[in-house]
Image: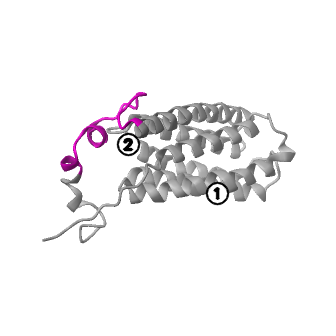
Amino acid sequence: MTRIVLRPIASPLPLGFFALGMGSTVLSSLQLGWVPAAQSSILLLLVLIFVVPLQLVGGVFAFLARDAGAGTALLLLGAAWAGTSVTSLDSPPGKPVVAQAVFLLALVPFVLALAGAAVQSKPLFAVLLTLTAVRFALTGLYEADLGNVFQTAAGWTGLGIGVFALYGGLALLVEDGKQRTVLPLFRRGKARESIEGDLREQLTEAQQEAGVRHQL
C-alpha cells in the first residue's frame, strides 16, 4: 500500500497580495513625484527589507501548498523587485536606466504567461498579474528614455494594483476564516472545487502531482 501524506498549511496568498499591494503603492509614490527623488534610496530599501522577503516567503509556501502558478508568480515578482531595487540604488536618482528597461520589458511576456495560465481558474489573480505586466511595460518604456508620461502612467497603474491587491488579500483572509467565499473572488474550475468540493475531490489527482510522481 502506498500512502501520500499531506501537511496542511495556512494560505500564503493573502500575504503575497498584501506585500505586492504595499510595494506597488510605495513605488507609485516615487514615480508620481510624491516623494522627492533624493529620498528614493529610503523607499527602495524599504521595498528590499519589507516587501521582497514577504513575497519570497509567500512564494515558497505556495509551492508547499501545491500551487505552482501562485508560487511561480510570487517568487518571480519578489526576485524582480529585489533586482530592480538593488540596481536602482546604484543608479542616479530620477534618471532612466536602459539596462532596467531591457530587464523589465523582457519580464512582461513571462508575467502575461502566468496571467494566461491563471485566467481559467483564478481570474482575479490573472487580472492582478496582467496589471503588473502593464506596469512593468510602462516602467520599462520610461527607463528606455521615451518620456516621463510612461512613468506617470506606471505610477497610477501601480496605485490600481495596490487597491486591487488590498481587496484580493482581504477577500482571501475572510474566505479562509469563514471557510467559504464571502467577498467575490470569481474562482472557477479546479480553484472553485478546492473551496466547495470535498476531500476526495482534492486528493483524486494527488498521485499525478510533482513530488509524488517519478518525474517532473
Give coordinates of residue 101: x percent, y percent: 65, 50
If the image is split into quadrants, where does the N terminus sit? bottom left
Q: Please identify the quarter of the rendering in which residue 88 is found.
A: bottom right
Amino acid type of the residue that numbered disc 1 sits on in the rendered structure: Ala
Amino acid type of the residue that numbered disc 2 sits on in the rendered structure: Ala
Furthest toward the right, the residue is: 38
> Mark 1 near mark 2, Cβ–Cβ under 8 Å?
no
**Where does label 1 land, which residue?**
82
Q: Nearer the viewer, residue 153 or 77?
A: 77
In percent of the image, x 51 and y 35: which residue is there?
A: 170
- Left or right: 120, with 33 as reference point: left
Badge 1: few (under 14), some or many (20 or more) residues near its Cα, within 10 Å?
many
In percent of the image, x 30 and y 61: which residue is there?
A: 6
In percent of the image, x 67 and y 52: which residue is there?
A: 50
- Seen in the picture, residue 125 relative to 45 is either above or below; the reply is above
**Where does label 2 land, which residue?**
118
Badge 2: few (under 14), some or many (20 or more) residues near its Cα, within 10 Å?
some
Give coordinates of residue 121: x percent, y percent: 33, 39
Q: Magenta span covers which residues?
A: 178-202
